[in-house]
Amino acid sequence: MNQKLDLLQGTLDLLILRTLLGGPAHGHAIAKHIQRTSEDLLQVETGSLYPALHRLEAKGWIEASWALSDKGKRARYYKLKREGRKQLSSERSKWDAFARAMGLILTADERS
Amino acid sequence: MNTNLRKLRWLFARRRRDAELADELAFHLEQEAEERGYDAARRELGNIGLIKEDTRASWGWTWVEQLLQDVRYAARTMRKSLAFTALATLSLALGIGANTAIFSFIDALMMRSLRVGEPEKLVTLNWHASISRMRGSVLHSGSGSTWKEGGGTGSGIFPYAAFELLHKTEVFSNVFGYFWIRSANFYARGQAEATTGELVTGDYFRGLGLVPAAGRFFVADDDRAGAAAVVVLGFDLAHRRFGDVASAVGESVLINNRPYTVAGVASPGFSGLDPAQSPELYIPLHSGEDARSFDDEHYYWLLISARLRPGMTIAQAEAQLGPVFHRWVESTAADDQERAHLPQLVLKNGSKGLDTLRGNFSKPLFVLLGVAASILAIACANIANLLLARATARRREMAVRLSIGAGRWRVIRQLLTESVLLASIGGAAGTLIAIWGVRSLVPLLSSATRPLTLKPDLNSHVLAAAIALSMVTGLLFGLAPALQATRVDVIPALKEVRANDRTRRFTLSHVLVVGQITLSLLLVLGASLFVRTLSKLESVQLGFNRENILLFKLDAAQAGHTTPEIFSFYRDLQTRFGSIPGVLSAGVAQTPLVGEGSWFTPVVPVGKQPNPDQDTRVLMVGPDYLATMRIPLIAGRELDDRDFARSAAVAVVNEKYVKAYFEGRNALGQRIVMNMRPGKAPLEFEIVGVTKDFRYGDLKEELPTIAFVPFNQIPFGRIGEMTYSLRTVGDPLAAVATTREIVRQADARVPVTHITTQATMVEQTMTQEILFARLCSGFAILALAIACVGLYGTMSYTVARRTGEIGIRMALGAPRARVVWMIMRQVAIMGAIGVAIGLPAAWATSRVVKSFLYGIKADDPSSIAAAIGTMAIAVLVAGFAPARRASRIDPVIALRSE
């Protein structure tokens, strides 16, 4: 499982939104969550994570506030907004359709 | 909506947001460090600056921030190199200023629509004839302007019969004619003033679709012989003289001593159809003009405009009317010669008014615009060059920026901001120059014979043009240097070594220098042509003494004097002017000798047929005119009191006339005849004197044949305005007060007008040449200076870059002279290429300016040689300093610094 996958263009937003569905989190935690849940297949570059977070915030899908972390340090927590949830479900159905289409094509030969 | 507001708030809370971002990233690093250790965490995080930059980009509004940042940075850079900034701004300001000033004239001349209803439906009627002089054509006499176009003649004046013909056709919904009144003595409520007006046909105001500000406009019935005399006043005149314009209606006024009733007042802002004229009153055609003007179908005078019927295009109208007009004009031709070159009808878009003024002024303006554009191009090339040199100096800075993650586009944008800022400052200063330039150009462009009454101003068009020009020039001279500056090899630039610096012989900056040399050559050549034209004109032998002559005009006819009483009125005044202390003698003539054109007609010995190519200029004068003007007599006597007392039919002719008609034989006592128009009684005169040749009329023309006749003989028309010439001992203008007093005592109704001196008048005939010579010389010197600075800069930079190489050459024994030669050769090659491109270009452009030259040809070899010589000297001087510096390079120091 040492193989790392590059994130597909545009999927980072979806991953962030999905992660925040589980509750507010700071940037580092989001990155770790994605990495852990994907069994280390996906690693989020810090250089794309923060621009993405701030972009989503500017779009009004998530909001940020400063709070103390479990270890008592000040951290910037991101929370999903209602617009974000809506966006998540539409993105998600798009992704499902896309994944299904990919699957159908890639397995077409095996089934015939 | 909401998002934009939020973005805006973020923009202002930027500092706080920056700090928060730093905190956020620091927290991330800390978390990561706890898990994997600081070094690994730091490595994983990568370029923090870049992350911050990218994150900030997602906040939006970054371009505004970056712009502000760039402008701040640019301002700092500009402050650091003040000399460069000042030089660049100054040359740009001059370039943009000159272009803006001239553009504002072109705007006023060509781009403003008339303030009338539906101007796009208006057409003006013109004609074109395929011969360049109208003598011997159906146009026997005319009043108005004709111009040369496409090897023939164009004009907008028609006989009244043509107007009646067009009136009957179905093509137009309205046809109307008009004619200028150059001077009108307007008298109302006990006060007289001199103004200008227009004679118009009954349909004039209706055709233009205007609504009166008060009262009514003319109806067709006002414009017929015998109708009650009515006048429509311009808004300004009515407002000035009667206060409330409505109260002007119904007032009785005198115009040139004839009673009129004010029928109405025109709408404010309307002043006729010609941007060059500003009539203040309008009189029906038939109440202001003689019957002769309406009956003579060979007398061309009436300007005609029309409104197209709905759905009709100019081309359709022209196609329909062309044959109609042709048939009519053919019927007026008397012989085959007249039939050979009939005028053809041409319809032009009339939405911007007449184009007589355009015909006169557009070409000089476009030449000036070309000159101004060249100077701006040279300035741009020069700044681009300086920026290129600076880009090299800033290689390290650029390398640092690029290596720490700045995108190339971002750096280019920053450099472009610098150049556009520079151009904007130049543009702002240029606009100030333009305001000043417009004010000083108006009197320079107008001359005594063609007064310019345009009202150019810096309106929104012109300002927009100035701003666009600044932006474009900024991008133009900034782009190439910006591209070059960002194309650096980061590593060697950072190490500050001249790593594999392929010394290309000819770089972009050399191309720019060659371009500057080419354009400068054009300007220098133009300047030398115009300066020589002016000096040729100034050295024209007048044949009379122009110094110490006071000129002024009186029009007794406008004040009610009539023949024959008017003769003694004018004659008595002449005697009284002659006795003013300080006045040596006084003369009177119909027009001044130079500065106002001339009268001409065939004048031939009795029994000879008139030659259509040889007209004689006729001047009606009072006694002692030749003595006053100091025109020398070579035979016989001049016209004196006896001729006037007897009103004898005598004439004085010039030497050229004697040569042309008497083959140089004694002409005294011979009889000549003039005024041979059909239906007119020819007048015979006996020659009593012959003068040396002198100038009467246009200085640029060949010497004319001239005849003087006593003014009480009146060969043509009626006697009206007369011009007095007073030869004084000292300053001619010192006699003005006494003169006015004498006229006031004689008749207070007659105003003294057009007071000037003969010397001024002569100079005014050359205003355009003077303007061209001065402006072009100024611009040529400027261009030369800028090009030399550019060349000097480029060569200095070349020498600096090749210091190492030159050091090696000298260490190996190259003599100094060889080093100088090495650099100068490059200078000479650039100069030669510039000239090689410049000469064909000069040849092409000289055809454009040909019509502005006098006494020299456009391909005048000595002017070309002078221009090339000037250019060569300037180029070599500018190149020599860097070459000399190269030869002083100490090989030891040069090699050590490597």
Image (cartoon, coloured by chain):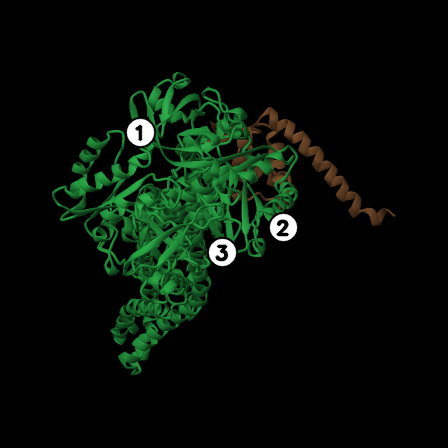
The answer to the question of whether label 3 and label 2 lie on touching residues, with beta carbons closer than 8 A, is no
Q: Nearer the viewer, mark 3 or mark 2?
A: 3
- Colour of chain A in the image: brown
The residue positioned 50% from the left and 54% from the top of the image is B136
Chain that bears disc 1: B
- Colour of chain B in the image: green
| Discs 3 and 1 lie in a common subunit | yes
Q: Is residue B881 above or below residue B128?
A: below
Q: Which residue is mark 3?
A: B132
Dot 1 alpha-carbon crowd within 10 angstroms: few under 14, some 14 to 19, many 20 or more: few
Q: Which residue is mark 2?
A: A2
Q: Nearer the viewer, residue B855 or A51?
A: B855
Dot 2 alpha-carbon crowd within 10 angstroms: few under 14, some 14 to 19, many 20 or more: few
Residue B193: assigned label:
1
SS category of the residue bearing label 1: strand
Q: Is residue B880 above or below residue B24?
A: below
Q: Left or right: A56 with respect to B490?
A: right
Chain that bears disc 3: B
The residues bearing labels 3 and 1 have C-alpha atoms spaced at a distance of 40 Å
